[in-house]
Amino acid sequence: MAVRPTVIWPDPRLREPTVAVTTVDDSVRELYRDLCDSMYAENGLGMAAPQIGDHRKMFIVEPKLAGRPETDLPVCLMNPEVLWTSDEVQDSEEGCLSFPDIYIKVKRPMRCRVRAMGLDGQLFEIEGEALMARCLLHENDHLTGKLLVDFVGPLKRQMIKKKLQKVKDAESEAEAEA
Ligand code: NI
């Protein structure tokens, strides 16, 4: 088990360009396992590679949300491509492991279809509705460097920055005392 520390905004690694995965080798499988361990450690519904400091195009989605048995492994999407989004939209609060305790109202399509490469190296398509669509599009945004704060104005962005800086300061203080 390898839980890697979650990269918290405004860490510049969240904005770095990502690279496509060409072959599924041991290092890709290791990234997948670390991503799963890290997501479960934080009780996330999804997580993208840049959030654990890796710039390969991979994200995962929690199996139950993806409509699979709870005991399944998380769904792995590499080199994802959004094929279709509905005109119908949803507007609800969205969180992100890179923005602890921050929730922002984000308007997203109600449904979407994504094509990606799976761990078997084969392309597959997956559809999502409501929260699943939101999760697919949110994680896909991570791979293009788009983040929650891009949906708010400069004032709110500044507030979020201050709040996360406080969290960071408290953490480093606790570390220094330990
Ligand atoms: Ni996120």
Image (tube, helix red, strand yellow):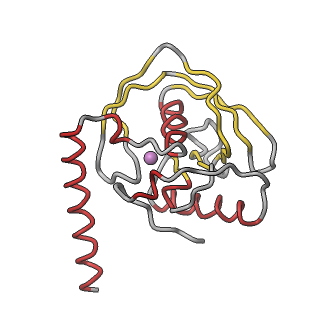
Q: Nearer the viewer, residue 16 or 84?
A: 16
Q: Residue furthest bottom?
A: 178
* Picture quadrant where residue 42 is located: bottom left
- Residue 131 percent coordinates (x, y): 48, 32
Q: Nearer the viewer, residue 146 or 61?
A: 146
Residue at 48% across, 32% down: 134
- Residue 124 percent coordinates (x, y): 75, 35
- Residue 77 percent coordinates (x, y): 66, 44
Q: Residue furthest top?
A: 87
- Position above or below: 12 against 128: below
- Position above or below: 112 against 61: above
Residue at 58% across, 25% down: 112
Residue at 22% across, 39% down: 154
- Position above or below: 153 against 21: above
- Residue 144 percent coordinates (x, y): 52, 42
In what quadrant of the picture does the C terminus appear?
Answer: bottom left
* Picture quadrant where residue 56 is located: bottom right
From the viewer's perspective, tell me whether residue 46 is left or right of residue 124: left
- Position above or below: 113 against 102: above
In what quadrant of the picture does the N terminus appear?
Answer: bottom right
From the viewer's perspective, tell me whether residue 86 is left or right of residue 92: right
Residue at 35% across, 38% down: 150
Looking at the image, how many numbered discs can be counted on the residues? 0
